[in-house]
Amino acid sequence: MKVLKFGGTSVGSPERIKNLAELVQADESRIIVLSAMAGTTNALVEITDLLYKENNDLANEKISELETQYRKRIEELYTTEEYKSKGNELINSHFNYIRNFVYRSFTTLQEKAILAQGELISTAMFHYYLSEIGVNSTFLPALNFMRIDKDGEPDYFYIKENLERILSEESEHKLFITQGFICRNVYGEVDNLKRGGSDYTASLIGSVLQSEEVQIWTDIDGFHNNDPRYVENTSALKQLSFDEAAELAYFGAKIMHPSSIVPCKLNHVPVRLKNTLSPLDEGTLISDDSIGKGIKAIAAKDGITALKIKSGRMLLAYGFLRKVFEVFEIYKTPIDMITTSEVAVSLTIDDDSNLKEIESELVKYGNVEIDKDQSIICIVGDFISESAGSAKLVLEALEHIPLRMISYGGSLHNISVLVSKEDKVAALQALSNHLF
Ligand code: ADP
Ligand code: ASP
Ligand code: MG
């Protein structure tokens, strides 16, 4: 069994959906994971924001705009009256459902239900299209097997049990279609795996089924050695190890959801990144092996807050770091980077929703300085052997950029620096120029 995930642009128009129908047909068993059509989840987020603000009239307008787009797509996608009418019924039912939430009190429960509509619509549209052109496929509703636990983490046991049971009931079929991104939570409510979560869905399915390969199909020819949105002359990598890819995804390489490598790494399921616009390209293979030495790729993550806790009493004071870390634990706030000196510790967080509370606890231990709008730049590679001098190369490249923190040695494949967000693009470009 292979798992193939197609992102928003790969299902972004009737034409792309038609191409996809060609791409997914094969002699092997496949589970196809689809995102919402490009732009839909953003539009649904905008609608839910308006509903939270009780701006119901404008929300209604936005709902109608999105509906009109879908009516047009239905017209273009299907040829027969039968399927045009099925498609229109589909759009009626989903948009009537969304309209139910207008002029009512609005909570996160309803928000999540609305955000799920994009994937529900795209998968149903694709399933109908395959059926119209005579290709047999089986629908696997993600809400019947994809589940997160009380901490928001995937419930591997539940996912495996249910997916295997459903598949065993459909054992004569080969081509399955399911939704990325959406799931149920521990209370059985509709929830999701966070923005970009369709990659995570594919990787979870691939992992619990011990799949032969997970393929992530998108609009670019693989994992690039730097962020192509900000840097010129980046190039696709042939291969990365799970650890290298996980580090890059976590630190901002948008091509993959930050958590999506972990499930495949745990079960040694290779991941291949492929380009829908150029399907014959090999793309990037992510596997257990780390091939090649030295610096391989760079990514950057914005929205970072740095905190410096300075204590006159830290000198030789054991227990200080434990007390500091406990504060972050209490507020369930992960720390990304840490640097220490004899008298101070600096660390970074990206979730600042409890910053005020954290600060008021930390001041008990020392003087606290906070810098917002920072970016972590993460340089990934194999720094174990023959690559002495990697840190020197990085620092040389960044000699004109003010560095707030530097972290090296935490793992064998990561050097991270913290810069002000304004310096991010210049830093990424300087690194590309100097290193590749
Ligand atoms: P999808 O909708 O298919 O999930 P995304 O937009 O989430 O696609 O991810 C693909 C995009 O990620 C690319 O178009 C590219 O702009 C961006 N990207 C950021 N960093 C990288 C990188 N290191 N390599 C490749 N693409 C990257
Ligand atoms: N549709 C969701 C999003 O836009 C999930 C995804 O595309 O991966 O975030
Ligand atoms: Mg994505």
Image: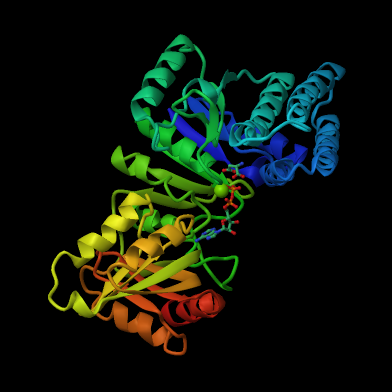
User: In the image, residue 404 lies at what x, y percent?
Assistant: 40, 79
Tell me the quarter of the picture where residue 158 sits: top left
| Front one among 326 and 334 | 326
User: Does residue 257 appear left or right of residue 261 in this picture?
Assistant: right
Q: Residue at x 37, y 19 (%)?
A: 161
Is residue 377 something one can see in this rendering?
no
Q: Residue at x 23, y 61 (%)?
A: 323
User: Does residue 30 appear left or right of residue 115 in this picture?
Assistant: left
Q: Residue at x 76, y 37 (%)?
A: 14
User: In the image, residue 331 lies at what x, y percent?
Assistant: 37, 51
| Front one among 323 and 259 | 323
User: In the image, residue 248 lies at what x, y percent?
Assistant: 42, 59
Tell how many labels. Answer: 0
Coloration of the structure image: rainbow
Q: Quadrant of the N terminus?
A: top left
Is residue 224 something one can see in this rendering?
yes
User: Does residue 330 appear left or right of residue 1 in this picture?
Assistant: left
Q: Quadrant of the C terminus?
A: bottom left
| Front one among 411 and 381 | 411
